[in-house]
């Protein structure tokens, strides 16, 4: 709605609009600056990356002198690939996720997210360079490198340092936490939202109090159990009883225990905003309680489930303390592995590689938010206006 269509009393004065827009602009610059800066550093040689001259960090003269650079044509093609990728994610791929039932939608979204990532990588690193070669030869000066840029640090991180193994562990832990949290959270949240039990409500309140405790306190309680798990399980499983310490399963169990009260509470709030009339109508049509939950309530709850799943994903994906204490050095997730770069004697090259690794782990977050942006906004605003 434009200001012209609003009543005069509801229109914001120009000074207020100017101040609010200026504040948002300053906040955006402050929030985006660290990410943009480390992104520029990750594609430069160590001399340029840690230069005291900001212009050298951006342009990369030493990187350019080493024969690593991009031309105006390369930059234009890169922008085109990014723009087309965003278009594909928001307008072309998202309608493909329409399906009957929650499981079908989850599978569709997973396939679309993976497909988008593959297409982006192929377009950026295969198609764009292939198109750039004839264009650079044809356009002459526009094909000359003007900006220093190298991907050698990313190649060193992912190939030489086997960072993909840490990525696989992170995916395993994150998928486990999100799956268990949402499976238990949706069932428990629905039950609590439709139940008038005071006891269940106070149990959840107590669980939220434990959720507020520092993670170090909870890990300290779990740690002896996992270390001695082989001895505890030997009477049941025999001599082949496994040791849970150092296994992703232990991290999944702890992170779920930490996050589950918040997940249940959040999903309970979403379920409470769904009219009980839907349950009653489904029951009249012959559905059981679970069938009503599965076929009637869950499709309506889809934005709330995605929003809650995002918070569970961020908890598991960005966790440092639990993963660093319960996983050994050979089986770490990405965040503790990056910290390991800085906790040892390093050269400037190692430090730039650490920056490249840090930039790499932000890519799935951008992909996740970009793919699910509409559902996330819908979920966050659910219940804001109720009538």
Image (spheres, grey):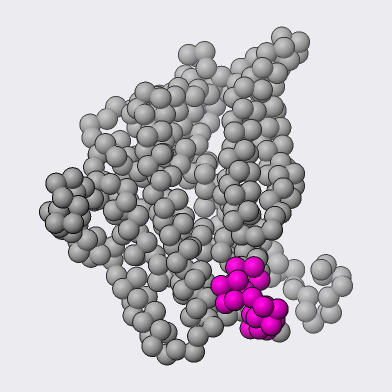
Taking the spot 44% from the left edge, 62% from the top edge, the residue there is 181
Which quadrant: the N terminus?
bottom right
x and y percentages locating residue 136 in the rendered image: 70, 13
Rendered residue at 37%/34% (across/down): 165
**In this orientation, which residue lies closer to the viewer: 374 or 2?**
374
Residue 91 percent across, percent down from the top left: 75, 47
Is residue 280 part of the magenta span, yes or no? yes
Q: Outermost residue toward the front? A: 286
Residue 72 visible, this angle: no
| Horizontal arrangement in the rendering, residue 385 relative to residue 191 (left or right) | right
| Residue depicted at x 29% and y 70% | 213
Q: Specify start and end residues of the magenta stretch as a single range.
A: 275-296
Residue placed most toward the observer, 216 or 54:
216
Any magenta on residue 267? no
Picture coordinates of residue 318, whole percent (x, y): 40, 51
Predominant SS along the magenta part: helix
- 386 or 134, nearer to the observer: 386
């Amino acid at each position: 709605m434009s200001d012209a269509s609003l009543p005069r009393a509801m229109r914001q004065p120009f000074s207020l609009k100017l101040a609010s827009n200026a504040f948002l602009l300053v906040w955006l610059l402050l929030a985006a600056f660290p990410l943009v800066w480390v992104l520029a550093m990750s594609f430069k040689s160590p001399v340029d990356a840690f230069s005291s001259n900001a212009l050298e960090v951006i342009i990369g003269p030493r990187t350019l002198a080493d024969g690593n650079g991009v031309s105006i044509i390369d930059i234009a093609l890169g922008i085109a690939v990014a723009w087309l990728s965003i278009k594909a994610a928001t307008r072309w791929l998202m309608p493909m996720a329409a399906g009957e039932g929650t499981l079908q939608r989850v599978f569709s979204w997973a396939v679309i997210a993976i497909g988008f990532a593959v297409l982006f990588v192929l377009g950026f690193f295969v198609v764009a360079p292939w198109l750039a070669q004839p264009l650079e030869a044809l356009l002459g000066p526009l094909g000359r490198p003007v900006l220093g840029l190298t991907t050698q640090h990313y190649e060193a991180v992912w190939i030489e340092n086997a960072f993909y193994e840490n990525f696989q562990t992170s995916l395993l832990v994150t998928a486990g936490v999100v799956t268990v949290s949402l499976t238990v959270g949706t069932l428990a949240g629905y039950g609590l939202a439709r139940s008038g039990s005071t006891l269940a409500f106070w149990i959840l309140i107590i669980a939220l109090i434990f959720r507020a405790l520092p993670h170090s306190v909870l890990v300290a309680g779990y740690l002896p159990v996992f270390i001695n798990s082989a001895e505890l399980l030997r009477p049941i499983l025999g001599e082949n009883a496994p040791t849970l310490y150092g296994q992703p399963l232990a991290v999944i169990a702890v992170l779920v225990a930490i996050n589950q009260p918040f997940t249940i509470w959040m999903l309970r709030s979403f379920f409470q905003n769904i009219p009980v009339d839907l349950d009653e109508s489904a029951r009249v049509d012959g559905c059981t309680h679970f069938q009503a939950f599965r076929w009637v309530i869950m499709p309506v709850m889809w934005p709330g489930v995605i929003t809650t799943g995002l918070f569970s994903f961020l908890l598991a994906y960005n966790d440092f303390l639990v993963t660093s204490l319960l996983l050994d050095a050979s089986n770490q997730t990405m965040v503790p592995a990056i910290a390991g770069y800085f906790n040892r004697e390093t050269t400037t090259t190692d430090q730039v590689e650490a920056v490249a690794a840090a930039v790499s782990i932000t890519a799935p977050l951008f992909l996740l938010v970009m793919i699910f942006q509409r559902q996330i906004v819908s979920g966050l605003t659910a219940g804001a206006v109720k009538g």
